[in-house]
Image (cartoon, rainbow, N blue to C red):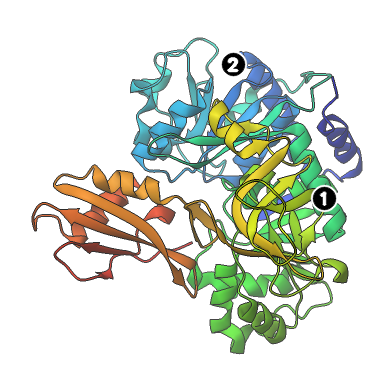
Amino acid sequence: MNVSPWLAKFDEVASSAPKSKPLMVEEETALTYGDLFQRVRQCGALFASLGLNVEDRVIVATQDNPSLIILFFALLRNGITAVILDPGASKIEARALVQAADAKVVFADAAFLETGEFDKLLPESVSYTTIASEKATGTGLLGRMLGRKTETSVATNFPAMLNALDAVYEPPASLDEDTVAYILFTSGTTSRPKGVEITHKNLFAQEQTFANQYQFDDNVQLLNMLPMFHTDGITHGPVLAFFVGATLHRPMVQFRVDLLPHLIRSIYTLQITHFITVPAVLALLQNFSNELSDAMKTRDFRFLISTAAYLDPNLWRDIEETYAIRIVNVYGLTETVCEALYCGPDDNTRKIGTVGKPVDCEAQIVDEAGKEVAQGEVGELLLKGDHVMKGYFRQPEETAAVLQDGWFHTGDLAKIDEEGFYHIVGRKKNVIITAGINVYPEDVTTVIRKMPDVVDAVTFGLPDATWGERVVSCVQAEDSNVTIENVAAYCGENLSREKLPCETACNFDPLVGVNSVEI
């Protein structure tokens, strides 16, 4: 057995990071390294009381980021698999994902638990605990769930319940590096959820590459407002900050477009060194160039990292010139933890309009027959390395289709230019990337087809200057009772926010706007 490198990393950070130093500052609240390690020890006692063992699965679905961070690191240290779900998922999505996870314990916001009504869906043995900010009032506990639980259930909110627990607990002395650290679901939320399994080895390899490529150390002040139930939010956020002993800043609980000036100005006020965001935010920045052009011209700020979606070269140049900064453009997938190719910050990997070069991994571009193509020719991008996922949870056929001889088939079309830089030119797989979030058209179409009087539907993406792509659905209905307005309302009840169609057309109506997507 090869031992998980995270055991030594926990010891290293515990001994080197000052207890009073913040791991994360969100608005006016700080989670310090001292608080984190105390909570991790207390969580170990809690997990033992819940009968959890190595590689058992625990669902975490919350908008309370300090609680998510505490649970993530506690689960990681104890070898228990975190299944991180979108706390804003619709009832259909939430129920499908929770069933697919087959977890022993659920830590979630009260709204998420109430939406899914999981007590009517899951086995009696599943234990539920509500998450509530320590600043929140009231218990928020779902009594009907706890009423049928065993004596091991703790009838209080998380993390307040930890205050009553003895922190004297010995975590596992050894864990295998192939222990699954977490599962993130990427698609099929309304039919067959596809959960990406990332091991301790995968996650450590990715964070090591981040630290080396970005030259991060404990002086980093990181700004990242991306949702923590997505890989770019969690692995590029608190896990990266922890890995190097740095501090993550989130000046607001949730990003809003109208608060973008406040966010950018915080780069100066918080002495931010690095900002991680998505191309959609950069597109919005163009609207504030007159008032914010000097916001990142500080002695502390080093560079901006653009992730999760295609970065238009013209936008790239405009932002660099307007704000006098350097953008690092990266490419990766949830299946590769987060990133695999890096365009910058060093000059050797930097070329505007590309995704740079592979770092700490191998890449090749192949044709339909699996043969490597010549320079300049387009084919599918394949990746191999320590950061490539273990597989899709309980889906051996789907795993075998994309993992072959150690190579991960990304489904993205790419080419290599004469200087060895990689260009992403399209996709083989059917996916819409809107504001850096993957939306699978089949998920949206499946929901709409279940609507009464709908005969058929199709969903696709259209280019959008701000969001990259927007979700569009066309609906064929039996009669005029199906309107654009009630299709939009039905989607709102049954789809998470990022999947809502921006435009919908019925067979008897012209194409009109339905709902704006907000990241």
Is the residue under label 2 in contact with that under label 1 (CB below 8 Å)? no
Dot 1: within a 10 Å radius of its alpha carbon, few (fewer than 14), some, or many (20 or more) residues? Answer: some
Q: Is residue 302 visible?
A: yes
- For discs 1 and 2, the disc positioned in front in the rendered view: 1
Task: Answer with mark 1 or mark 2, whichever residue precedes in sequence.
Answer: 2
Name the residue nearer the viewer: 164 or 61. Answer: 61
Give residue 265's position: percent from left, percent from top.
65, 75
Give residue 27's position: percent from left, percent from top.
62, 58
Q: How many marks?
A: 2
Q: Which residue is mark 2?
A: 50
Amino acid type, callout 2:
Leu
Give residue 492's position: percent from left, percent from top.
31, 52
Amino acid type, callout 1:
Thr
Relative to 509, say whether 78 is above or below. Answer: above
**Residue found 71% across the figure and 20% down from its top:** 166
Q: Which disc, if any, is residue 108? A: none
Dot 2: within a 10 Å radius of its alpha carbon, few (fewer than 14), some, or many (20 or more) residues? Answer: some
**Residue 54 located left or right of residue 465:** right
Marks 1 and 2, Cα distance to the nearest angstrom? 35 Å
Residue 358 placement: quadrant:
bottom right
**Residue found 79% across the figure and 49% down from its top:** 362
Q: Which disc, if any, is residue 209? A: 1
Name the residue nearer the viewer: 463 or 295. Answer: 463
**Residue found 60% across the figure and 46% down from its top:** 65
Which structural element holds mark 2?
Answer: loop
